[in-house]
Amino acid sequence: MNLTTEQDSYISTLLCGIDSSLWVTCFAEAGGQHVSGMARAVEELGLRACLTQSTMDSGEGLPPSWASRTSDDCIQSQKELYQKHHNTADGRIRIWLGIRQIMNSTDRLLLETRDTSRELKTGIHMHVSEIPYENQLVMDTRKVEHGTVSYLEKIDFLQKNLLAAHTVWVNNTEIGFLSRAGVKVSHCPASAMRMLGFAPIKEMLDSGICVSLGTDGAPSNNRMSMVDEMYLTSLINKGREVFANGTTDPTALPSETVLKMATINGAKTVLWDDEIGSIETGKKADLVVVNTNLWSMVPVHDCISSLVYCMRTENIVSVMCNGKWIMKEKKILNVDEGEVISVAKEASGKLLKRAGISIPNRMNVL
């Protein structure tokens, strides 16, 4: 039984999309089960997205409704979603293939996903090397020297259309594997600090890997703010230098690198940099308008530094995607913000009841 419905997915995507509309024009979703609900919401919001269906065909913790799924079932359902939604919404929606994580994937699912992505000429989204337990399990069960990246290299899964989310627990050899294969990495600093660890981002960038920024999902972050992620990326990776090299380096991940990670590297990561990611003749009109004349940014001497270290969400006043305003002067244009919030509250309450979850009061709060 699936506790969530397509309507839940639609409402959740609307809510997340409103939050995202405050700072972003395009996103990649790690995957749920109701992709059609996501696609409907993305089309209404006016955003650009790479959507995936999360797939798992083995391992512990599978929901009962997934227990009978085979790798062939997973591939077929994704092909159907591709045929239904890919390149819809004026070309703003692309369908990718999704692997949840190696711990819940057979080799057959991994290799069929790789081959299908080549057939459809689309991308793959996969969580990679998130925690030490994952690497240890791969070493124990799949007999490689280190972990997930080493195994994916062994079976020829690493390729240019793979978006490896997190990629925290990798060694220098594996960084070399990722670099040579052209794998793209999504760094999610807030989520990493909450439960994953310090990713070797500077080493990846130095090796030529395209590293972009992500927020991860709300359960792992709570804030869907790229503004926050840019700020955290620079600070966290400067601090990591102390532990990695025993000395401080305030030049590690300078502001211009972080801004590239949030813009053109993001476009490269979702395989869309021929059309978006920078303001150039011939590219799509996706842009964010920033008001620098607020207390948080005044005075602006170094524009790039101010965007990374001083900008807050309230500085963003308008957002355009595909040549159309989706937020103008702080007003979300394509959906009723108040109605979405009201419906989301109701839907989340019903979901908690279906799941049998009750949140206890831990403090007296008015």
Image (cartoon, rainbow, N blue to C red):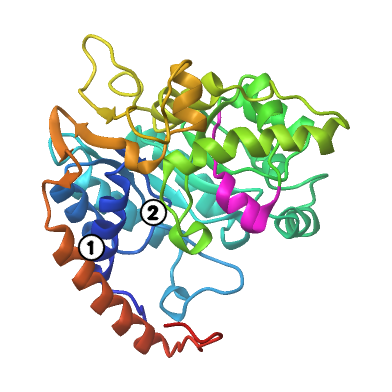
> Residue 75: which numbered mark, if any?
2
Range of magenta residues: 183-197
In percent of width and height, residue 200 lies at: 71, 35
Q: Image height check: is 161 above or below 15?
A: above
The amino acid type, in three-letter code, at marker 1 is Tyr
Instruction: Report whether residue 71 is seen.
Output: yes
Image quarter of residue 286: top left
Identify the residue shown where x is 56% and y is 25%. 182
The amino acid type, in three-letter code, at marker 2 is Ile
Which numbered mark, 2 or 1, is in the foreground of this view?
Answer: 1
Numbered disc 1: secondary structure: helix
> Residue 10: which numbered mark, if any?
1
Image quarter of residue 366: bottom left
Left or right: 327, with 175 as reference point: left
Observer-nearest of 338 and 171: 338
Numbered disc 2: secondary structure: helix
Left or right: 321, with 28 as reference point: left
Earlier along the polypeptide chain: callout 2 or callout 1? 1
Residue 116 within the magenta-colored segment of the rendering:
no
Q: Residue furthest right?
A: 246
